[in-house]
Each structure stands twice: as structure tokens, then as C-alpha cells.
Amino acid sequence: MDHPRPPAANPFLPPPQRHQLHLCRDCRHTGRPCLAGLALLERLRAAIAASGAEEGFEISGSARLESCDRPCTVVWQVSAGAAWLFGDADPAGDIGEMVAQAGHGDLPREGGPAAVIATRAGAIQ
């Protein structure tokens, strides 16, 4: 199956700061990483870099992904320094709470997000 890929770099825009994969929980429905979710995070990070937004700028939202056999709603939060995506999650849920729980390893396997992806700016220490 083909998965969406981020668009080619625009030579007129600054590249986004390099991120390293920080956390990736395979989707419990497909048993694979959510590549469409990762591609979405890359596009959002590139848009933030291209906008010239200030250091503390952050954006969050939800999207419906239909790139596999089981379409789902994802919620995401992206800044210049970090990006989070939660698959098959309630768009009315508290994204800040999900980020905090995932950062502490407290997200439940059952009843929680089906997939989790997190990236951080710079090298993982």
C-alpha cells in the first residue's frame, strides 16, 4: 500500500528543524506504525518552519486519515520543538493531557489511543 509522503522541500523556504523519533506505538488495529500520521506531522512541522512563527507557537487539531483498511480520527499537537499524534482518539479529548500522559509513559494500551507518534527537535539524549 502506498502511504502519503511529505512534499519535496521548497528551495525558497527554510527547512524545518530536524526531529528525531521519540516514541512510536504501532497501531493496535493494523499492527504497524501509522505512516500517514507521521507524514501529517512532517507537513505540519514544515508549515510551522515556513511561517516563521515565534518560538512558543503551537498548533493542535484533528484529522480523518483514510490511508489503511481502518480509517480513523487522529489528534495532533505540533510546535517547532515537538510533535505528537494520537490515532483513533476522541477529537474532543484533552490533547494536553494525552501529551502529558504519553510523556510519562502513562497511556493505557486498552481504551487509549490506537497509535502514538512523538518527535522531538534535535538529538535524543
Image (cartoon, rainbow, N blue to C red):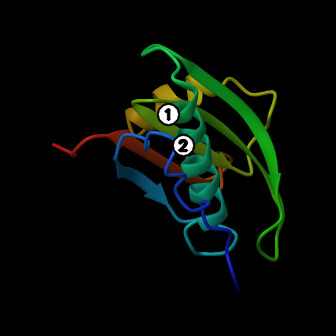
Single out the residue that lies furthest toward the front.
12
> Is residue 68 or residue 107 the one in the foreground?
68
Label 2 Cα neighbours within 10 Å, binned few <14 / some 14-19 / many ≥20: many
Name the side, left or right, on which 104 lies relative to 61. Answer: left
Indicate the amino acid at tag 1. Ala
Decide: is 70 above or below 88. Answer: below
Residue at numbered disc 2: 46
| Amino acid type assigned to the residue bearing label 2 in the image | Ala
> Relative to the observer, which residue lies in front, 105 or 65?
65
In the image, taking residue 21 as reference, residue 76 lies left or right, namely right
Q: Residue at x 70, y 69 (%)?
A: 29
- Where is 11 relative to 31, above or below? above
57 lies above or below 45: above
Q: Residue at x 51, y 41 (%)?
A: 13
Question: Residue 81: x, y in percent?
Answer: 39, 30
Q: Quadrant of the C terminus?
A: top left
Q: Mark 1 and mark 2: span between their CA atoms? A: 5 Å
For residue 114, side relative to residue 8 (left or right) = right
Confirm or deny contact between disc 1 and disc 2 (CB under 8 A).
Answer: yes
Give 51 or 121, whichever is nearer the viewer. Answer: 51
Image quadrant in which you'd find residue 120:
top left
Q: Residue at x 81, y 57 (%)?
A: 72
Question: Element under label 2?
Answer: helix
Q: Residue furthest bottom?
A: 1
Q: Residue at x 83, y 65 (%)?
A: 66
**Residue linked to disc 1:** 49
Q: Mark 1: which secondary structure?
A: helix
The mark total stands at 2
Q: Position of residue 7 (x, y in %)?
A: 62, 60
